[in-house]
Amino acid sequence: AGTGRIVFQANYGETVTITSTGGPYSAPVFLGTNFVVLDGITTAPATMIGSQPPIMVYGNRNTIAGSSFTGLFQGYALVEVAGQYNMFYDVFASTVGPNQTDGSAFAFNTANSSYNTIQNSSMSRGQHDQVIIVNGGDYNRVYNNLIDAQGYGTGYQTRSNGPNQCSYNLVEGNIIKNVSTVHYAYKVGIALLGPNGTARRNVVYDGWAGATYNAAKGIEVSMMYPGEGNNNLIYNNTIVNNGSVGIVFWNGVAGNIIRNNLFYNNAVGYTGDGYEYLSDASSNSNTIDHNYFGNTNTLSVIKRSYGNDITVATADANYAEFDSNFDRSNTIDFLDYANRDLHLRSTSLIRDIGAVVTDST
């Protein structure tokens, strides 16, 4: 009792279900204190009233593990995090709301939402996002998760809001798939609208391939306010078979490093020609090197400054931001592409072609 720590743990092999009336200020789980552990907890599906999230973590240094949260609700998030140093491990979070702006599985939504971790968990069916870090959350870690949008919103997003920039967040080792294949809206596998973030060793595939502007993009780097979307480090990701471009840069973002990534067979459904890289005229002060850009339709997979589609070789030879990239003349040789086993065979010509990345995270 003197430690100030509280543990709620289900017996091994049993399920503890927490229910709520669903009324205002009656969330099934509200952690407003510190050092609480929830282990093996399930919340009964419920339709929440108003914008109150069913799971609210406002305290610090809490742990939720081995737990399952589901619900149909009209609101901001299934799990809302407004504290620091909280851990979510082996958590299943799945929800869907009635409108495209309703619901993220996880939302870190204040400047105090920092130093939190989601690890070895599964999240799905958030209409807006599966994970969103917004309004100033810094140094959060989202890694080794299954992020299956199941046809709905963006997989992972950092989004600053003017002075409250979301900086130094990490998304690593996640499988992100099936973005927007049911709910057709502008969605992305990984969206970086904050500065100084890191996206590494993620696999993003099978986003919606509708022939419209809203077709799902693999990675987007952009900004809503000056200074956001700059100086991100994006490396060792595999971006495959998404409906729109593999990676896109908007609104004058600069200082980003894109290295050792594999972009394959994206944008075929959207454009008919299958470009893998897109930038607007104000977003060409980034570093793009040692990446693979290729698809089965064409060698002209780069669309810089909304210009004509050009080849990787032309981009490397003529534009300062491009260097030492590779195209489809270098055979990928996936282990089993049809079943999305995207490991490279020992015979692949793009093994060991990357460059060293300096990364403090």
Image: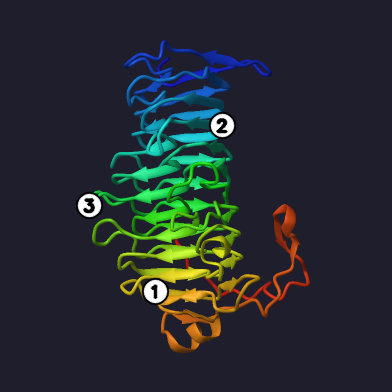
Q: Earlier in the sequence, mark 2 or mark 1?
A: 2
Residue type for callout 3: Gly
Q: Which residue is mark 3?
A: 162
- State the residue at coordinates (68%, 78%): 330
Q: Write down the quadrant of residue 82 in the picture.
A: top left
Task: Give the CA distance from mark 2 to mark 1.
Answer: 40 Å
Examine the rendering and report whether any part of residue 101 can be seen.
yes
Q: Measuring from the top left, give residue 261's x and y in whole percent.
A: 56, 67
Residue situated furthest left in the rendering? 163
Q: Which residue is mark 2?
A: 92
Q: Earlier in the sequence, mark 3 or mark 1?
A: 3
Q: Measuring from the top left, give residue 91's x and y in whole percent.
A: 55, 32
Examine the rendering and report whether any part of residue 361 can be seen.
no
Task: Give the CA distance from mark 3 to mark 2.
Answer: 32 Å
Q: Which residue is mark 1?
A: 306
Disc 3 and disc 1 in contact, CB within 8 angstroms? no
Dot 3, how many residues are within 10 Å of its Cα: few (below 14), some (14-19), or many (20+)? some
Q: Is residue 158 left or right of residue 331?
A: left
How many numbered discs? 3
Disc 3 and disc 2 in contact, CB within 8 angstroms? no
Vertical comparison of 65 with 191: above or below? above
Task: Give the CA distance from mark 3 to mark 1.
Answer: 27 Å
Q: Measuring from the top left, give residue 56's x and y in whole percent.
A: 38, 26
Q: Secondary structure at mark 3?
A: loop
Disc 2 and disc 1 in contact, CB within 8 angstroms? no
- State the residue at coordinates (36%, 71%): 280
Quarter containing the N terminus: top left
Question: Who is closer to the viewer here, 110 or 303?
Answer: 303
Q: Measuring from the top left, give residue 319's x and y in whole percent.
A: 42, 84
Q: Secondary structure at mark 1?
A: helix
